[in-house]
Image (cartoon, rainbow, N blue to C red):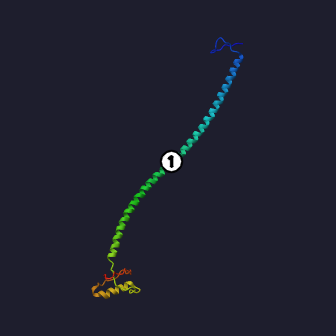
């Protein structure tokens, strides 16, 4: 039997065996296409799963970045407040240091030094010794009735230079 087909040479007849071979090849091609289609669909499914996992991970990372940014903003605000407090405290410390230096100067200014008293002459009460010494040397008539010693202590001084004032 001879069959004529469109697109083939018109003068040559096609045999049944040729048609069977073409049909077998067509079936094989269709099976290959179907296998490729299934394989591609499996790979697309795998890619889709991976994309979904990546999207979930991206959401987690985005949340963490947002949290970190808010914490950083909070820390920056706290740092600014602390820097301002440090600046204020530094200024206060400087004011207090000036006042302290002034008070120390005033305390030293009001001190009375008595030079030439032998070591150990004060006995057990330095205040009483100094009071008696001043009363005996200056006399009660030169001092007011309210003469008192607030504080007295012994401080060993350097020995005077030879030929210098006592």
Along the horizontal axis of the image, is 81 left or right of 16? left
- Which residue is found at the position 61% from the left and 36% from the top? 45
Image quarter hosting the C terminus: bottom left
Question: Residue 87's quadrant in the figure?
Answer: bottom left
Please identify the residue farthest to the left as the structure is shown.
142
Along the horizontal axis of the image, is 120 left or right of 26? left
**Residue 89's x, y, as percent?**
39, 62
Residue 127's place in the image compared with 58, above or below, is below
- Which residue is found at the position 70% from the left and 18% from the top? 18
- Which residue is found at the position 71% from the left and 16% from the top? 16
Image quarter hosting the N terminus: top right
**Front one among 26 and 76:** 26
- Which residue is found at the position 62% from the left and 33% from the top? 41
**Residue 140's x, y, as percent?**
29, 87
**Residue 122's x, y, as percent?**
38, 86
**Front one among 122 and 159:** 159
Along the horizontal axis of the image, is 113 left or right of 29? left
Along the horizontal axis of the image, is 78 left or right of 35? left
Residue 5's place in the image compared with 36, above or below, is above
Residue 104's place in the image compared with 25, above or below, is below
Under circle 1, the secondary element is helix
**Residue 20's x, y, as percent?**
71, 19
Q: Which residue is mark 1?
A: 65
Residue 151's place in the image compared with 83, above or below, is below
**Front one among 165 and 154:** 165
Please identify the residue farthest to the front as the structure is shown.
162
Count of picture labels? 1
Please identify the residue farthest to the top as the structure is shown.
11
The local crowd at label 1, few if under 14, some if 14 to 19, many if 20 or more residues have their Cα within 10 Å, is few
């Amino acid at each position: 039997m001879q069959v004529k087909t469109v697109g083939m040479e018109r003068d040559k007849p096609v045999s049944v065996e040729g048609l069977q071979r073409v049909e077998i090849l067509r079936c094989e091609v269709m099976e290959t296409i179907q296998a490729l289609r299934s394989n591609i669909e499996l790979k697309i499914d795998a890619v889709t799963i991976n994309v979904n996992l990546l999207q979930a991970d991206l959401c987690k990372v985005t949340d963490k970045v947002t949290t970190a940014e808010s914490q950083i903003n909070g820390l920056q605000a706290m740092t600014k407040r602390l820097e301002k407090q440090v600046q204020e405290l530094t200024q206060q410390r400087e004011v207090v240091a000036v006042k302290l230096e002034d008070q120390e100067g005033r305390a030293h200014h009001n001190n009375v030094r008595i030079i030439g008293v032998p070591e150990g002459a004060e006995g057990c009460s330095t205040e009483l010794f100094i009071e008696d010494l001043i009363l005996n040397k200056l006399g009660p008539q030169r001092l007011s009735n309210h003469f008192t010693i607030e504080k007295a202590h012994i401080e060993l001084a350097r020995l005077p230079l030879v030929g210098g004032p006592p």
